[in-house]
Each structure stands twice: as structure tokens, then as C-alpha cells.
Image (cartoon, grey):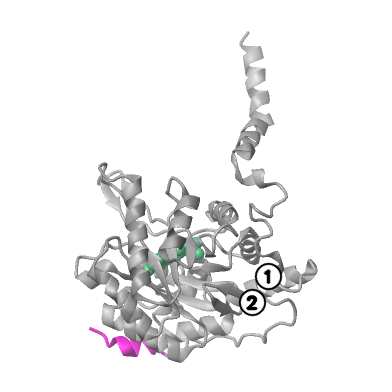
Amino acid sequence: MKDLNAIRNDSIPPHESPAPTPEGPSLRTIYLGLDLDSPLVVGASPLCDNLGTVRCLEDYGASAIVMHSLFEEQITGEQLASIYVMESIAGAYAEARSYFPRADDYKLGPDQYLEQIQRIKRAVNMPCIASLNGTTTGGWMNYARYIEQAGADALELNIYHIPTDPNETGEQVESNLVEIVKQVRAAIKIPIAVKLGPFFSSIANLAGKLELAGANGLVLFNRFYQPDICIADQTAMPNLHLSEAGETLLLRLRWLAILSKRFNLSLACSGGVHSAEDVIKAVMCGANAVQLVSVLLKNGPAVLMRIKKEIVDTLKALEYRSIEQIQGSMSMINCPDPRTFERGNYMRILQSWRPDRAWTQDVTLKSLGSR
Ligand SMILES: Cc1cc2nc3c(=O)[nH]c(=O)nc-3n(C[C@H](O)[C@H](O)[C@H](O)COP(=O)(O)O)c2cc1C
């Protein structure tokens, strides 16, 4: 086995030095009670495994980093489901490959995970948010305390549960989630964010329960990695597809807007944030922070500098002094037309759709000719 310390303390990959902070609107934001230089947070991913990469991300403008998850199965010793497959990504995006640890390197065991928190805290000034990923209440949750002791500034809880048992009710799924948050809250003092999936009957109701259970923020949403099917072999294939620009953001924007300002919860947008425009939309809908992963894995850390500059330019052009001024401006509570997020708009959209003229003309001509 390769020496993990040596791997993670790799020298910093070569990069241009970032431009000085541009004069102009302030991008400062408060997320989970943490005072961040900007909403640009590196989302949970293996980007935390190499200290050179972590420093580089900070230099280019990341305001905080979320570590990839430490999984319940890693702690309890069960076989780890291969949810995240790193090698395929490193192969597909050669330009960003130099920033990646190899697949074997990033799977930090529980003890190495805690050591890595300490290393990151020593290496950079930005907050480090650890992530625990599990589905049951149990001894593995003790790691929340160890994570706090190791110096993490906050903890993200990812309850990645796929309810396949027909006897399990939606209520049970939610009460299990709430119970995990309550127990972790009782164990630690640092802020807790809960990373949710979008598949709940009433997300707003659940958000209220999570706030009562002690959560300080929500991350919307988990991105589920759906296995594909191989027709020839009739096998299910694990499939890690990085998000594309414009792909999954709209679902997030809607729920940010619905939840914003209704609870005492910070909100982070995770999934499909690829550009300055995406960041601004998410903040307008109520995000206190956005988490970027795919765009960084595809392009490398330098993309942060471009996104940050474009946010500043846009705010300047619109004559805002700070990003805070637009935070939540398009939330359902503040939006001039809250129906945008509700059923009324859905009906309008469906009823206003008209078929493409080219093929309707073709069908009309054909039906006239056949008479
Ligand atoms: C290679 C890879 C590893 C990831 N690892 C984790 C993880 O350990 N824990 C977690 O909560 N999310 C993990 N994610 C999900 C991301 O944090 C994020 O929610 C998702 O990629 C959507 O954001 P994006 O569109 O910016 O990629 C991972 C994603 C990728 C691509």
C-alpha cells in the first residue's frame, strides 16, 4: 500500500497565480454561521484528498471545502457500496486529471479521515466541512464527535437511503432521518447541514422537522447515481455521470425559493452549478452558498476564479454593492409572482404549449392529400 501521507502531501500542482481580489461588490455570505468570503464552496468530493489541490482551490477563490463522506459502512466495516467511481472521471477529463488522487488513494479510512481534517485545517484558512454518510442510528455516529474534535468547522450529514422495502413507510423514512440528526446534534456543537435528496412527499414539512431536530442548514440536493442497464449482459452497471450545465439546477432553484426565509436554516445549492449565472440564480432563490463539484472535476480549480470574476462583474453591472442584497430576492416569500413556484404556473405552461409548425403543416398536407 502506498504511503497515504506522502500522497496527500503531494506538491501543489503547477498553476497560474490567481489575480488579486477584484475591487467591487462584496461576495461575503454567512453559511451555517460561518463567515465565508463568497458563496463558492467546494462540494463533497475527492478534491479534499490532496493538500496541493485544497490549497489551489483556496487560492483560486473557494470559500470553504466539504470533504467527501466518511461512510457508515467504512466505520462499521461492512462492504462499501461503490457509489462514487473516481477512475472513470479521471479518465474522461484529462485536463483536470492532475488534480485527482487515484481511486485507491481517496478512500480514506476512518482514522485517516480524521487526520486529513487536521491537515486541511493546518494547510488553509477556509473552513473545512466534514461529511458523514449513513442510514441507521448506531455507533458509527460517534464519529461526529471525533470529527468535531479533529477540528472540522461543520458537519454535513448525508442520509443516502433508498427505501426499497415496500413495508417501509414514508413516515418511517423521515423519522429515521430526523432521529439521526437529533442524536448527532446531541453529540456535537459544530453546525450541522443535512444533505437531502429531492424525493420526499413534503420537503417543506421535513425541513421544519430537521430544524427542530437541531440542523443548521440544508444542502439541496443529493444527486443520485442511477445504475444503467446493459441490454446484452442483462447486468446493472454503476454509472457516474458528472452534471452538465443547465441539467439539474432548476429543481434546486425551485426548492431553494420555496424554503428560503421560512426556517432558521442556511441553504446550500448542490447539483448543476456551473457558471456565475447559476450561482447568482441560486443566491436569488435563497442559497447562502453553492457547492461546486462537476465543474471543478471537469475544468480544475482555476474555473473558480473566472466564476468569481463574472459574479462581481454582473453585480457591478446591476449596481449592487454586495451579493447579500440579492440573497433571497426571488424566494417565494419575496418573489413578485410566487405562483411561479406553484401549481398555477404548471397549468399555464402546459396549456400554452403549441406543437412545432413544421411537422403540423406536414401532417395537415398529408391528411388533405389522402382525402
Ligand atoms: C466523484 C464524486 C464524488 C462524490 N463524493 C461524495 C461524497 O462522498 N459525499 C457526498 O455527499 N456527495 C458526494 N458527491 C456528490 C457531490 O457532492 C454533489 O452533490 C454532486 O456531484 C452534484 O453537484 P455537481 O453537479 O456540482 O457535481 C460526489 C460527487 C462526485 C462526482
- Measured from the top left, where is residue 191 in percent x and y? 45, 74
Residue 289 occupies which quadrant of the picture? Answer: bottom right
Return the residue nearer the eye: 168 or 133: 168
Q: Quadrant of the C terminus?
A: top right
Q: How many marks?
A: 2
Looking at this view, name the residue that lies furthest to the top: 371
- Which residue: 30% across, 78% down? 108
What amino acid type is highlighted by mark number 2? Arg
Question: Which residue is labeled 2 in the image?
Answer: 28
Residue 149 vertical position relative to residue 359 in the rendered view, above or below:
below
Name the side, left or right, on which 64 lies relative to 50: right
Please provide the residue range marked out in magenta: 1-10
Return the residue nearer the eye: 154 or 100: 154
Q: Secondary structure at mark 1?
A: helix
- Measured from the top left, where is residue 301 in percent x and y? 53, 77
**Real-space Cα separation, disc 2 to disc 1, in angstroms:** 7 Å
